[in-house]
Amino acid sequence: MYPYWKNMLAKLRGKQSFQFWHIFANFRPEKNLVLTSTSKKVIWLEVRKQCVIAGPMVCTNLLQYSITIVSIIYVGHLGELELSSASIATSFASVTGYTLLLGMGSGLETLCGQAYGAHQHESVGVYLQAAIFCMLLVCIPVAVLWFNMEFLLLLMGQDHEISAMAGMYFGWLVPSLFGVAMLHPLLKFLQSQSVVLPMMLCSLFAFLFHIVLCYILIYTLDAGFIGAALATTISFWLNAILLMLYIKFSVICKKTWRGLSTETFSAVKPFMKLAIPSAFMICLEYWSFELLVLLSGLLPNPKIELSVLSICLNTAALTYMIPFGVSAAVSTRVSNELGAGQPDVAKFSVKIGLGLSSIQALIIASTQLILRNLWGNIFSSSDEVVDYVAKIMPLLAITSFMDGIQGVLSGVARGCGWQEYAAYANLGAFYCIGMPTAVILAFVFHLNGWGLWLGLACGLFVQMSSLFIMTIRTDWAKQADYAKGRLDNSSLKHLLITSADPAEV
């Protein structure tokens, strides 16, 4: 009775069973969606698996995002010049370095996730080493860019005093670049194995340490402005070191981390093949938000426009940490199941993930609508700013809803290895549709900041629609074959075969 649900329950519990992917292909709701006790167990088990990953990932993302925010808050109490310099330095650091490394590291979600699902454990650690090696190399030209940021800011027409201090701040942030280059691969390595609680605890310790360290450096040791940058660098490195120690000595990672391997260089090519489009996929979206801030400075009354757009962007970034956590959960579940040759379970995970994302997106959007008249007071005491924020908040709520859905769809893309297609989708959505629409609405129709945000919303809608069409048209059996082919065609094939535990295969 109800073989579909019984089979899914067996697979989600880790038992090997028959392949029932054809049930999805010929899906008839009147027969397969009857909520029996077995079907409820299946749904609840998948929901629990995703929530166990998503919850700690949300906290981890929030804690890491908050490190730079805490630094800015401390600097804000030193003076307006210090705040302006640190803010522009942090913004440019995110655009030119941190986001790039986050995107490259996301390539491991495909490689490590599918290899772990296929029980090819030792290759997971080899891919980690290849990712760290490649990303550290990428940091070298970025570090050169950061060391010359004062000159570049002057070329862009920034104030001389602000440029000088921002350049100084950048100089002390350069070592953090290499720490972040190690941090992101370590996070993806653990995420692919659903080992998320240690990530959260390490991030929490680093965050609390950062709060104390900022106070000591800025006020006790009188390091002032550069103390915040130094504290940021130390805290990122501390987080990375804690994760490395956990991986080294944890019993959980014993199978996937077996020390340094000579196979690392063989894994560089398959990693870069995914890392480059993955970086473009994420950077193209993040850069569009930053471009919105630059455009707001060209509007009439730029101080008000820039303040309001900054508040909206910070709000969007903060609330996105929740769908980003769900996205990580879906990416992990999809990559693991495709690697294990279970396309039906992967498709089921996508359905549950989209359900969870719809619920959280609706809650976030509703909360923003309810608080629209109060939210601006948190950031500003100006009535003009508060009223303007209240005017844009309904539009922000719509974009937050779409962002919540597309975040999970992007997770599906990373889990399947669609980074290249998603990068093209983001390029078209934001730079062929979103930004041109924003410019026309803001500067031709004189909708100002509201027009800029409406243009961004158009880009998000196109992005979400493109990823949704890709997802619903997917042949999941072929995706499992592609995952198998990706592992079989890897130059690590001999390592992958020998590292698999016969008792687990």
Image (cartoon, rainbow, N blue to C red):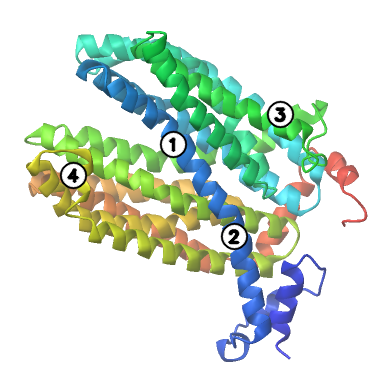
The residue to which callout 1 is attached is 65
In 3D space, how far apart are the residues under numbered discs 4 and 3 (Cα atoms)? 43 Å
Query: Is mark 4 in CB contact (under 8 Å) with mark 2?
Result: no
Mark seen at residue 377: 4
Query: Is mark 4 in CB contact (under 8 Å) with mark 1?
Result: no
Q: Residue at x 45, y 54 (%)?
A: 323
Q: Which badge, 4 or 3, comes first in the chain's sequence?
A: 3
Q: Secondary structure at mark 1?
A: helix
Q: Which badge, 2 or 1, comes first in the chain's sequence?
A: 2
Query: Is mark 1 in CB contact (under 8 Å) with mark 3?
Result: no
Q: Secondary structure at mark 3?
A: helix
- For disc 1, the neighbor class at 10 Å (few under 14, some 14 to 19, many from 20) is some
Q: Which badge, 4 or 1, comes first in the chain's sequence?
A: 1
Q: Which badge, 4 or 2, comes first in the chain's sequence?
A: 2
Observer-side mark, 3 or 2, equals 3
Observer-side mark, 4 or 2, equals 4
Query: Which amino acid does the dot numbered 1 rest on?
Result: Tyr
Residue nearest the viewer, comparing 54 with 91: 54
The residue to which callout 2 is attached is 50
Q: Quadrant of the C terminus?
A: bottom right
Q: Position of residue 28 (x, y in %)?
A: 59, 87
In 3D space, how far apart are the residues under numbered discs 4 and 1 (Cα atoms)? 22 Å
Is 344 above or below relative to 81?
below
In 3D space, how far apart are the residues under numbered discs 4 and 2 (Cα atoms)? 35 Å
Q: Residue at x 10, y 39 (%)?
A: 382
**Residue 200 in the figure: left or right of residue 244:** left
- For disc 4, the neighbor class at 10 Å (few under 14, some 14 to 19, many from 20) is some
Observer-side mark, 4 or 3, equals 4
Mark seen at residue 245: 3
Is 42 above or below relative to 430?
below
Q: Secondary structure at mark 4?
A: helix
